[in-house]
Image (cartoon, helix red, strand yellow):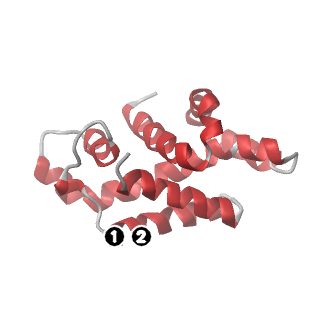
Amino acid sequence: MDDDQAVIAELTQLALSRAAPDELAVFEETAEEYFADPQAALSATSKDTAVGFGLELAMLTPVALAVGSTVLQALAAMLSERFLAAGGRSVSAMLRRVFRRDQPPDPALTLTPEQAQYLRQVALQRAHALGMPPQQAHLLADSFVGALATPG
């Protein structure tokens, strides 16, 4: 897993700990499959959702990884000026500082309410585009923003 994928996985785990904590037990394996072939992982998700509630829940992770990737792209674009001003750090390292809980929040990287709302909209649009049911899409979008904008 490369550094960008690791950042996506880290943020997605934080969001899933809020939206679907039961999936964390199989997260690493599912993430490896997703990063190896995102289209195949997402296709398998859409086929399996009709089988039953249990499978539908278990297949949230590939969609969450796709949404997490989109959210991080939007976040990087949004904070790019701040990243450049901080200098000397990789974008991945700076992104991690936005959602890391093991260090004090960096005021220069704190999201405004408007930025948090924008990222929620980005997540919601991507979840809908991937065919996620509205209630799950809202929960996932809220979970990503919660992972980015709130401590712990």
Which quarter of the picture shows residue 17? top right
Which of the numbered marks, if any, corresponds to residue 113?
A: 1
Relative image position of residue 6 (x, y in whole percent)? 42, 33
What is the count of numbered marks? 2
Looking at the image, which residue is at 76% across and 50% down? 46
Identified at 56% across, 61% down, the residue is 126
SS for dot 1: helix
What is the number of the mark on residue 16?
none
Could you tell me the amino acid type at mark 2?
A: Gln
Q: CA distance from mark 2 to mark 1?
A: 6 Å
Could you tell me which quadrant the C terminus lies in? top left
Horizontal side of 102 relative to 89 (left or right) equals right
Q: Residue at x 47, y 65 (%)?
A: 120
Mark 2: secondary structure: helix
Where does residue 144 sit, x and y in percent of width and height?
A: 48, 54
- Residue type at tag 1: Pro
Mark 2 and 1 residues: CB-CB less than 8 Å, in contact? yes
x, y (%) of residue 64?
A: 58, 48
Q: Which residue is label 2 attached to?
A: 117
Position of 4 with respect to 78 (left or right) is right
Of residues 74 and 119, the one drawn nearer to the viewer in this rendering: 119
- Relative depth, front residue between 53 and 30: 53
As drawn, which residue projects farthest toward the front? 152
Q: Is residue 131 above or below residue 86?
A: below
